[in-house]
Image (cartoon, helix red, strand yellow):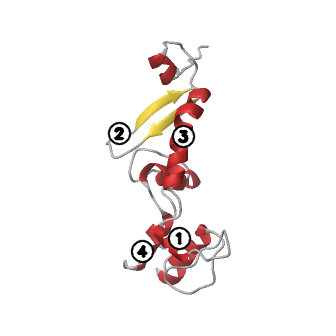
Amino acid sequence: MREIITQSWCDHHDQNDGVKVEATVTAVIALDFDEPGEVDLCSECNDMLLGPIQTLLMRARQPSMIERANHKPGSTNSYGCPLCDRAPYTNRNSLVEHVWRDHAHQTRPKQPPKCPNCPMETRPPGMTRHRAMAHGYDMLTEALEAVNQPARRRSHG
């Protein structure tokens, strides 16, 4: 019996000091290129190199102008609907559900298993995060855009 073991080495260590350190993370970096790039990193380099980038991306993902304008004063975690005067929602997900249901008159679409912007495939909860981090996807913006679109056909089957 044979077993083939594939081992990845940290790209940062390999390129900078020639030391072979086992990679524990493969980061997929997808911008507006046809193919996303992959970087293999050890956990130390992941924290050192990608940690600051992830922090910057999360800062860039701060509440949008719509959210800031409709954020109810006096509460740190409430969002008002930009389209009506409904009571504030305690989280963005509830607000998004409200916009889909009450304004777009549709059910919120499920996230696809394959990213529409790159070859990435993952389960739906991970896809929302991937699309937000890699492509700037915003579920509230998607819901607000659906308000002015004709209703999707619902398949019964």
Q: Residues within 10 Å of mark 3 (few under 14, many from 20)?
A: few
Q: Residues within 10 Å of mark 1 (few under 14, many from 20)?
A: few
> Is residue 127 in sight in this rendering?
no
Q: Quadrant of the N terminus?
A: top right
Q: Nearer the viewer, mark 1 or mark 4?
A: 1
Nearest to N terminus: mark 4 or mark 3: 3
Dots 2, 3 in contact, CB < 8 A: no
- Residue at 50% of width from left, 59% of height from top? 111
Distance of label 2 from label 3 (alpha carbons): 23 Å
Q: Which mark is residue 35?
A: 2
> Residue 31 vs residue 81: left or right?
left
Q: Nearer the viewer, mark 2 or mark 1?
A: 1
- Residue at 63% of width from left, 79% of height from top? 88
Q: Which residue is mark 4?
A: 146
Q: Amino acid at mark 3?
A: Pro
Q: Amino acid at mark 1?
A: Arg
Dots 4, 3 in contact, CB < 8 A: no
Q: Which residue is mark 1?
A: 68
Nearest to N terminus: mark 2 or mark 3: 2
Q: Which residue is mark 3?
A: 52
> Residue 145 vs residue 127: left or right?
left
Nearest to N terminus: mark 1 or mark 3: 3
Distance of label 1 from label 3 (alpha carbons): 25 Å
Nearest to N terminus: mark 2 or mark 1: 2
